[in-house]
Image: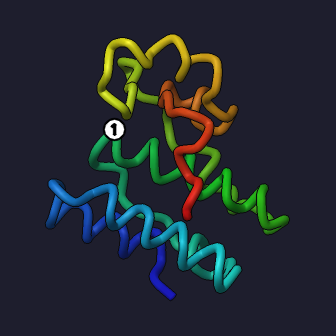
Amino acid sequence: MISLREVKKQIESDSKNWLVWLMDFVDDFRYHKDPAAVVEPFELTNEKVDAVLASVAEYLCDELNIECPEWLLKVPACKVPWFISGMENLKAIAIVESPLHFRIRKIFVLENFLSRV
């Protein structure tokens, strides 16, 4: 089981594939359901990455009925809203569909962002 802190390190060393690292964590966390994966805080060094990782972890904790560590709640929002799709024509949909955990940190995703096939 990979921890959220380790995922952040992987994303920092391979930012082109950040979404691959993130979704690997999502799959792993959903499979193992191990709260230890999100217990250890990471250093806040990248506003967007920090916000999306915290949002994903909170979302998954709620989904899996796992108590969310308090440190995640303290990860700040992005100063400028981040629309992960990067597509102008999806912004309005993302504003409407983004789960609360993402919206409170000004991260906007489509409702299927964490859906896996």
Left or right of residue 77, residue 69 in this image: right
- Residue 24 is drawn in which quadrant? bottom left
> Can you say whether 14 is above or below 110 in the image?
below
> For this view, does 20 lie left or right of residue 111?
left
Circle 1 packing at 10 Å, graded few (<14), some (14-19), many (20+), is some
Q: Residue 52 versus residue 17: which sits nearer the camera?
A: 17
Which percent across, then down, holds residue 56?
56, 52
Q: Quadrant of residue 30?
A: bottom right
Q: Secondary structure at mark 1?
A: helix
Residue at x 44%, y 64% (from the top left corner): 23
Please name the residue that numbered disc 1 is placed on: 47
Q: 60 or 36: nearer the eye?
A: 60
* Residue 85, x across and y down, in percent: 36, 32
| Residue 54 x, y percent position in the rendering | 53, 51
Measured as percent of width and height from the top left, residue 53 is found at 46, 53
Report the colour scheme: rainbow
Q: Quadrant of residue 46?
A: top left
Residue drawn where x is 45% and y is 82% of the image: 2
Q: Residue furthest right?
A: 65
Q: Is residue 70 above or below residue 80?
A: below
| Residue appearing at x 36%, y 50% in the figure | 44
Number of labels in the image equals 1
Q: Residue at x 31, y 22 (%)?
A: 87
Position above or below: 96 against 20: above
Give the residue type at disc 1. Answer: Glu
- Quadrant where the C terminus is found in the figure: bottom right
